[in-house]
Image (cartoon, rainbow, N blue to C red):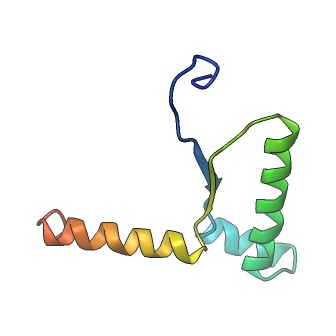
Amino acid sequence: YMRLSQRDVYFLTGTDEHGQKVQTTAATKGMDPLAFCDEVSRSFRELLTLLDIDNDRFIRTTEEFHKESVRHLWNVLKDNGAIY
């Protein structure tokens, strides 16, 4: 909607690949959690294409880039007294 409204946007979307739901569902399907997340991520991206949704970045929380970003944010918050 924002792009259609001619606004400058940077659209991020992705999959959260951590937590008990991921572990439990993967186990139910007899899959490794990361393999299950690979499947879900692939399906989600296919859905975005099908719906003609154009995102600038697709984030998977298991990606090293995401992990590094979270570590950086944590350290900034800690260094500024927001985490104690």
Count the labels in the image.
0
Task: State whether residue 79 is above or below residue 43.
Answer: below
Q: Is residue 10 left or right of residue 47?
A: left
For the point 60% across and 73% down, the residue is: 63
For the point 79% across and 43% down, the residue is: 48
Q: Quadrant of residue 41?
A: bottom right
In the rendering, at what x and y percent does residue 17 appear?
A: 63, 67
Residue that sits furthest to the top in the current view: 5
Task: State whether residue 80 is above or below residue 27.
Answer: above
In the rendering, at what x and y percent does residue 13 appear?
A: 61, 49
Task: State whether residue 68 is above or below residue 14.
Answer: below
In the rendering, at what x and y percent does residue 32 appear?
A: 78, 83
Q: Quadrant of residue 19?
A: bottom right
In the rendering, at what x and y percent does residue 49 appear?
A: 84, 43
Q: Nearer the viewer, residue 48 or 34?
A: 48
Q: Quadrant of residue 40?
A: bottom right
Q: Nearer the viewer, residue 18 or 6?
A: 6
Q: Nearer the viewer, residue 31 or 71?
A: 71
- Quarter of the image with the C terminus is bottom left
- Quarter of the image with the N terminus is top right
For the point 73% across and 78% down, the residue is: 34
For the point 87% across and 73% down, the residue is: 29
Task: State whether residue 38 is above or below residue 11.
Answer: below
Q: Is residue 77 left or right of residue 4?
A: left
